[in-house]
Amino acid sequence: SGVELPEAETRSVLSDAIQVAVRVRPILPKEAETRGAAETWRAVPHAGQVIRVGRLPTGAGGTTTCPTVFSYDFVFGKESTNVEVYEKVARPLVESALVGYNGTVFAYGQTSSGKTHTMWGSEADPGVMRRAVRDLFELARRTPQREFLIRVSYLEIYNETIRDLLHSNPAVTNVRVLEDSDGRICTDAREEIVVTAEQVCELLKNGEAKRMTGATDMNERSSRSHTILTLVIESRERAAEDSTSGDAEDSSSASDSAVRTATLTLVDLAGSERQKDAKSEGLRLKEGGYINKSLLTLGTVIHKLSEGGSAHVPYRDSKLTRMLQSSLGGNSRTAVICAITPAAAHAEETLSTLKFATRAK
Ligand code: ADP
Ligand code: MG
């Protein structure tokens, strides 16, 4: 059961329930040597805009049908760091998760656009997942009046099958999406209770390692699957006598106090590129179909939620939106970070990412 928050507070949080950010990565050194490394897209961060500075190839609808300016809540350019992206886009969701609001951050974009760089990052510049985990424990520590219990699960969705990356052999797992007695949608995935940020990072690294041994081509696999880190944050007011009596479970005053539960979900999505390669057939084509369908459904779900009202939201059309149903609707905040390359070689694919980002708002 969640907390009842004052109405005014609910409204102010929900007024910015869905935030859309676009991050333009630099041209990579290996791209710089090739044709098509010219820039088609440029970030104007202070204006919250992405502008088109080059032509689209003809046949893509031509330049006349493509706007030159796209506006978003946040735009980050090639100089941007993960700290900056995290602070502006994700940290507010981490903070509200600690007081009981569900939060979800998605990284969307074609393969090689910078999703994993943004979500996981490097040792020198950790990404959203590691920074969120670090802050979660830090903020909990600085809130001594409440007692926190944090659980983590780590999943992969590949071809509409959910794998448990915390399981010793993810390949044999087939995680189910269930409805609990309160009508909340959840999964039967393994959940580990965690007490430090380092512990979570270890779990994630181990999960990645297990996933790699099962795949013949890791890059191929990671570009075709969604990776989902879920942190369930439960808290309740610490009764004054708890600190001395030790066992909170036995204290009737503690069990009377409301337990707040919120879920913070961080998702590195599958590559959004269209499967137009002539060689894509059989299994490859099927994979592409699943990915496109789940990303299409995600776009529709976010669009319907941002419009508000009572329109039907098609959560059930994909595993991803189905499992996230309870965290996306209601008292929750969502941030979509769309990663793009400025390179002319991918101008059309980038246009479709920009359109996805526009539709999400
Ligand atoms: P994706 O996960 O979308 O497939 P990656 O995050 O793996 O893409 O990024 C592809 C390559 O581009 C990697 O070598 C990564 O280090 C680099 N890269 C991505 N974004 C940035 C950025 N903002 N600054 C510098 N390098 C980046
Ligand atoms: Mg990636």
Image: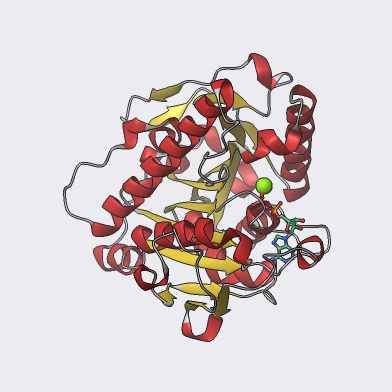
- Describe the colour scheme in one phrase: secondary structure
Quadrant where the image shows the N terminus? top left
Residue 299 image point, x, y percent? 38, 49
Left or right of 96? Residue 228 is: right
Residue 269 image point, x, y percent? 55, 45
In this view of the protein, can residue 240 be seen by the observer?
no
Left or right of 292? Residue 220 is: right
In this view of the protein, can residue 310 be seen by the observer?
yes
Q: Image point 81% across, 61% down: which residue?
A: 30
Residue 253 image point, x, y percent? 43, 43
Q: In front here: 80 or 207?
A: 80
Name of the residue lying farthest toward the bottom: 46
Q: Quadrant of residue 118?
A: bottom right
Quadrant where the image shows the C terminus? bottom left
Left or right of 13? Residue 97 is: right
Residue 353 image point, x, y percent? 48, 57
Q: In front here: 163 or 160?
A: 160
Q: In front here: 112 or 33?
A: 33
- Relative to 306, say whether 300 is above or below: above
Name of the residue lying farthest toward the top: 172
Name of the residue lying farthest toward the left: 310
Q: Image point 61% across, 66% down: which residue?
A: 344
Q: How many marks?
A: 0
Q: Quadrant of residue 15?
A: bottom left
Q: In front here: 346 or 316?
A: 346
